[in-house]
Structures are given as structure tokens and as C-alpha cells.
Image (cartoon, grey):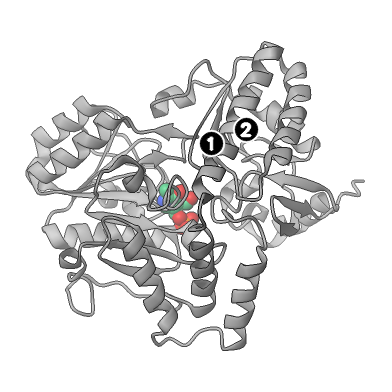
Amino acid sequence: MTTSQNDILFARAQKTTPGGVNSPVRAFRSVGGTPRFITRAEGPYFWDADGKRYIDYIGSWGPAIVGHAHPEVIKAVQDAAALGLSFGAPTEGEVLMAEEITRLVPSIEQVRLVSSGTEATMSALRLARGATGRDKIVKFEGCYHGHADSLLVKAGSGLLTFGNPTSAGVPEDFVKHTLVLDYNNVEQLKDAFDSFGSEIACVIVEPVAGNMNLVKATPAFLQAMRELCTQHGALLIFDEVMCGFRVALGGAQALYGIKPDLTALGKVIGGGMPVAAFGGSAALMQHMAPIGAVYQAGTLSGNPVAVAAGMTTLKLIQQPGFYQRLEASAKRLAEGLSAAAKEAGVTFCADYVGGMFGLYFSETPPTTYAEMMAGDRSKFNTFFHAMLDEGVYFAPAAFEAGFVSAQHDDAIIDATIDAARKVFATLK
Ligand code: PLP
């Protein structure tokens, strides 16, 4: 009989919650074993139900960029909560947040706050379709944009055929307008616009892909998307739910100097509370209700407590040198892990953009979904569990990017590399 509280909680959870979790990746299905039930978190660490401490490289899948339970964020949440949890009427906090986002993100003149990344991308798509009067959309294999029906789709069997649902319960009819192309494939994108240019409402993309491990968009790919969309009257949507305020202040669009028409944000802008957003030019955003014909709404949108956490996080990330330090930590980790693997003779590499990183059991970082899938997944799983035993928590799936926070200092990174050195020695 196990005495681990994680095992006991997981057994209990599975009786009342499908798979024991409220979001599938948390169930450890990809890596096997028992998910850790977390009791508290502070700075770069969290603790599980057995009291074991982990260096956390997930950061709640991105939001915890200033570290867990940052005293200023917690204080802002407590102060806001004391004034009431939700009003269903506008607040000054929402005005301040919109002013801050429009000031920081180059392409956003107006923004609408929502409560999840899924809502942000789903609403941006509806807006793109409403504003262009077109139905077809283009997405890329391996990019995840939340779980809206028309985005749960994989490539069809032929080139430039429309997609197949990746989830039961999504009617074929809902995805018949979604064309799924290969990430970083400029020629295929050109072909798609040659064939369907006048019908395409938008191209949606993660400009730094973080849902097929970390895969960087090439400058040529980003440029081609921008030019083809403009040429054919389609809108370019950057899904920066993950990379926004993560790879740079102002997101990937600031880092790469490419201006999308619409941007979806989430994660960091809520600082660990449910805030997400979508925005673009004032002219485009005028299509939204209550002034325009594209409907979208939310009982808890712009929630005052969540906005307080987000605004405080946005303030903290603007401290001088914040992103330089964040990227230096990701670089130290990526280079240190790569060197440790090399010493042990393990085929492995790592990469990073800003505060996001990827770990790959392959010779070189992947540039497409197919290359990513070709990595050694069973090695990753062994590595993952051995690191967990060492008190280091990486994403429980080979397909996910990792995140450092401002609290992952050199000593924490070096402790991680020391642990990995031991683990790599057993992996060869
Ligand atoms: N878009 C991207 C790029 C994401 O990484 C995610 C979530 O991981 C989403 C959208 C969906 O966000 P949420 O889980 O808040 O609905």
C-alpha cells in the first residue's frame, strides 16, 4: 500500500474527476506515473502533497514569470479581493490594463479582456471572420491555440486539403474551413494563398511555437505570412498567449519587428489569475459588440482581482534589465544542460527564446512538427522521471516548452544542471 499523498489524492481524484485532473496534460499520461499534487509555491519552487520540494520549470505553464507568490502580486490580489470579487460592471483597473497593454504591444490599439487563452483566440478568429466576411482559416500543425472547435484540427490526408478534427465531438463541418499547414514551410503557404487567397479570413500562428516543444519561426516564414496576408486581404493573428511578455516585453512581434493584425494574449498578463485578451487596430476592434456586429461577452471578463494580479505582474516585468536577466537564465540552463549531456555522450540539445526554453533528445532543435515528433520520446520520459526524483520539475510531456522565472537565479540553474549531469550519466 502506498503512503504517498500524491498517490492517495490521485486515486481519490479519479473517482470524481475524469482522469483525476482538470486539464489533460496534468495527468502525466505522456510520461507515466503519478502526477504531483501541489500544496504551495514560492519563488522558483513548489511543494507536493508529500512535502517534497521541486525547482519548477513550468511556472503554471507560463504565467509565473516573476516567480510564484511574489509578495507584491499577492498583496495586490488581497487588496483587490477585500473590495469585492466581481461586479459585472466596468472598473478603473480594466481601463488601466487596457492602457498598459496598448502601450506595450506594438500592434494593439484597442483590446478586449477575457478569462482564458481559448476565449482570446476563439474571439480573435470570430472577429477575423466577421471583419473580412470570409470563412476559411489557416493554422499550422503543432501549434495549439486552445480548444475552440475550429482549432482542434490536424492536417487532412492530401496536400492543401482541409483538416480532420483531433477531438471527438467536433463535427467535420466545424473544421471544414480550417486548412492545416506545416510550420516554417513558406512554399506551402504560398500554394495555399494561390489556391484559396480570396477566401482566407486569417492565418493564426504561434510566432514562437511552444506547444510542440519550443520551435522558432524562421524570419522568412514570419515575413511571408505578413506579406501574403496583406496581399490577399487576410488578417494575420499572432497567438501570443504563451510567448507574449515571455520572449520580450511587447512579445514576439516586438522581438521580430512583425506587426500582426490581431494578437491573442494570456498567461503572463494574468500573473497566475484568469486574464487573457485579444486586440488589434482600433478600426478592426470596432467590429466587436457593443458597437460592432461580432458578438463576444463574459461574466468574469476583466475580473478585478485577476486584473490586479495581472497589472502588478506587468509592472514588475518592466523593471530595468528584467528580460536580459530572464534570457540569461534560460541561456545558462540550455547551455549547461547541453554541455552536461555532451559530457555523458547523450544525444540532446536545448534552445531558448527570452524566458522560454526547449529540451530535445535529438541532434539539433526541430524546425517543424514532424522533426519534433522524431525526437527520442522514451529518453525524455526517463529523463523527466529521474529529474523529478532529483527535485526538478520539467513539463510532463516531450512536446512542451519550459519556462524560467525571475527567481531562477544562477544557483538554482546550476543545481538543475548538477542534477541533470547525474541523470544524463545513467541515460547513455
Ligand atoms: N494559445 C496558446 C499559444 C497556448 O499555449 C494556450 C495554452 O496553453 C492557449 C492558446 C489556450 O489558453 P488557455 O489554456 O488559457 O485557454
Residue 99, compared with residue 427, is above or below; it is below
Q: Foreground: 20 or 332?
A: 332
Foreground disc of the pair 2, 1: 2
Residue 345, compared with residue 223, is above or below; it is above
Q: Disc 2 designates what residue?
A: 333
The image shows residue 18 at horizontal and vertical percentages of 62, 56
Please, what secondary structure does the residue beneath circle 2 have?
A: helix
Mark 2 belongs to which amino acid? Answer: Leu
| Residue at x 35%, y 71% (from the top left corner) | 99
- Residue 367 falls in image quadrant: top left
Please, what secondary structure does the residue beneath circle 1 have?
A: strand
Q: Foreground: 388 or 414?
A: 414
Given contact means CB atoms under 8 Å apart, are the residues at marks 2 and 1 in contact? yes
The image shows residue 174 at horizontal and vertical percentages of 28, 52
| Residue at x 45%, y 68% (from the top left corner) | 115
Q: Disc 1 designates what residue?
A: 357
Q: CA distance from mark 2 to mark 1?
A: 9 Å
Mark 1 belongs to which amino acid? Answer: Phe
Total residue callouts:
2
Residue 315, compared with residue 45, is above or below; it is below
Q: Foreground: 265 or 129?
A: 265
